[in-house]
Image: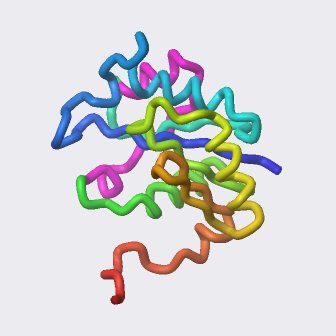
Amino acid sequence: MHVVGSINARLGSKRLPYKNLMPFAGRPLVGLGIEILRRAKRVNEIVVSTESELIARVAQDFGAKVLRRPSELAGDNVPSIPVFQHIVEHCPCDVHVNFNINFPLCAPEVIDRAVDFATERGEALSVPYAAWAQTADRLRHYGDPWAPEKK
C-alpha cells in the first residue's frame, strides 16, 4: 500500500504571515512537519502543496517533493478536499494523509493511526485535527466540497 503524506503550506496566511517559514524548535515549521511525516512508519512519500517559491525551496531542502498549487487552489476560502484531490491526481496513492503543521508537537504515531483508520473506514480525522486521511477512492467520490453544508 502506497501512502502519500502531505503538508499544505501557503505563504499568504492572513492571521500570521510567513507562518509556515517561522522557526519552531529550531527549524522552519514546514521543515519540522516534513521531519514528523518522515518518522511516520506508514508514509511512503512526502509532498508539500504550495504556491510559494520560498516554501518550495525549504521543502526541497528538507527532502520533500513539491507540488505547485494552482492559483484557483491557493485562496483563503478554498476547502481542503480540492487541494487533497490535486495532490492525489499528481501523486497517485492508495491513501493520502494530510498533516496540519499548526500542530507541530503531533507524534508520528497519530499520523500512522489516521492512515490505519482511513484504510479500514475510508476516512479519518484525528483529535485534535492534526491528521486527516482518506483513501484515494474516497477522494475521487467525495462529492462537491464547494457546496454549502446541509443542516
Q: Residue furthest right?
A: 1
Q: Is residue 55 above or below residue 82?
A: above
**On the rendered image, what quadrant is the C terminus found in?**
bottom left
Q: Is residue 49 above or below residue 29?
A: below
Q: Is residue 82 above or below residue 31?
A: below
The residue depicted at 46 percent of the width and 50 percent of the height is 128
Q: Residue furthest front?
A: 127
Q: Is residue 70 magenta?
A: yes
- Percent across and percent down for residue 25 are 42, 15
Q: How is the image coloured?
A: rainbow
The residue depicted at 22 percent of the width and 40 percent of the height is 13
The residue depicted at 68 percent of the width and 27 percent of the height is 39
- Percent across and percent down for residue 139 are 59, 67
Q: Is residue 97 above or below residue 78?
A: above
Q: Residue furthest top?
A: 26
- Percent across and percent down for residue 51 are 34, 39
- Total numbered labels placed on residues in the image: 0
Towards the viewer: 87 or 111:
111
The residue depicted at 70 percent of the width and 44 percent of the height is 112
Locate residue 93 relative to residue 62 in the image: left or right: right
Locate residue 72 relative to residue 105 in the image: left or right: left
Magenta stretch in the rendered image? 55-75
Towards the viewer: 129 or 79:
129
Towards the viewer: 6 or 32:
32
